[in-house]
Amino acid sequence: MVDLSINCGGIKSPNPFWLASAPPSNSAYQNCKAFEQGWGGTVWKTIGEPVMNVCNRYGGLDLNGEKLAGINNVELISDRPIETNFKEIAETKRLWSDRAVVVSIMVESKKETWQDIVKRTIDTGADGIELNYGCPHGMSERGMGAAVGQVPEYCKMITEWVTEVSTIPVLVKLTPNITDIRFPGRAAKAANADGISLINTINSIVGIDLDTLKIMPSVAGKSSHGGFAGPAVKPIALHHVSQIAKDPEINLPISGIGGITTWQDAAEFILLGATSVQLCTAVMHYGFRIIEDLVEGLTNWMESKGFTTIEDFRGKAVEQVDDFGNFNLLHKTVARIDQTKCIHCNLCYIACEDGAHQCIDLLPVNAHNETKVREEDCVGCCLCSLVCPVDGCISMVRVDDGSEEKTWNELMAEFKKEGKPLTWENLAEFQKKHGIVIH
């Protein structure tokens, strides 16, 4: 039997699926409704300083007919009285003792203010606290949110204020709007955080209405950068999660966030080191009901792989993340086209001819053009297989025998040992020796 239960930095839940701190987790009504349908936990929409939200708040990115491939927002933290939120948090935890109730908080950078809201949060019976160091708009202009997450020293200072008085686990939510996310991650570790949540939304302008010429969203004719989320940000989120998971100086549990829509997305985050996963845009788009597919899909996949717990596969992909200088330069693949599956759309030819390395030919066969790869000229870039609309039609096939390996770092070490400078001529000599195609 598969057991989906987790323990993320001391916060336990019956499955890894949590609501992210966002509009779907704004009230007791919503969180309790989510729990009724099977969600494992929630991160309550950020509470803290008094705010007023605006209309319109959201802008959407549609892609080839798909609605909300990404969503941009200029919404702030909870605009409900903080006393109302505390009351509803306590009520929700009392009703759902087996679910994770984590409270996201954000206040001005004063020690007494932070410690006061931490103590009041603990009094609700919540399971954990998430420190919002990621909000990229509105709050950051007031010295909060991303303004903290972008400065490791501030991140460490405020986290220390919190961990000094907190008796429940503390997660630090990081902003992706930074050059290297590992630095605030290390600051959180140094300040005794129990875990890290990432990513928060990405600074963005989602688009312009070409009829009205107004930037979306438009607030009475004005707009600004907002936070970008949704399926489009998943690759960026996976990168940041892998950076935190790979860093030996951090070594903290991770709650993964960013574009998670399906159980497959969740599995990818867990394979890169996340213990829990948080969802927002998918719930805003499809509702709480998606939890059924998330739980069933992940359960079935785990059974098919022989995994019985989340820990059985958590982080299994992390070791593959490495520096470019450690890639094997002698690994060689070429594209091969299965003519029985080809629909003769010629997209592979166009992509290779105009956008890559001109190694696919069009040959007239039986009143249509057959695409054929010149393997001696193929550099193994993989573009043709990516644009092909037919699954399994174009495969990247390994053609080296695996007997030799050489990384860039090793090659540079050899050059240095032999007294060779790095020149195009010396590099060409190495490439010719090993039959590496430059086209």
Image (cartoon, rainbow, N blue to C red):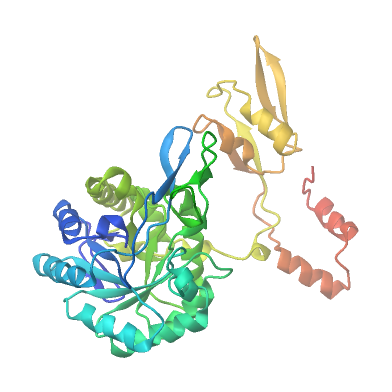
Q: Quadrant of the N terminus?
A: bottom left
Q: Quadrant of the C terminus?
A: top right
Give residue 334's position: percent from left, percent from top: 66, 40
Identify which residue, 178 or 377, lies in the foreground.
Answer: 178
Q: Residue at x 37, y 51 (%)?
A: 55
Q: Is residue 65 above or below residue 178?
A: above
Give residue 292's position: percent from left, percent from top: 22, 47
Task: Tell me how many marks there are.
Answer: 0
Q: Is residue 183 above or below residue 26?
A: below
Taking the image as drawn, is residue 267 in sight?
Answer: yes
Q: Residue at x 66, y 59 (%)?
A: 328
Q: Residue at x 78, y 45 (%)?
A: 437
Q: Residue at x 26, y 70 (%)?
A: 102
Taking the image as drawn, is residue 374 in sight?
Answer: no
Left or right position of 385 against 27: right
Left or right position of 360 against 191: right
Identify which residue, 318 or 37, lies in the foreground.
Answer: 37
Q: Which picture quadrant has residue 322?
A: bottom right
Left or right position of 219 against 32: right
Identify which residue, 80 or 179, lies in the foreground.
Answer: 80
Give residue 233's position: percent from left, percent from top: 47, 53
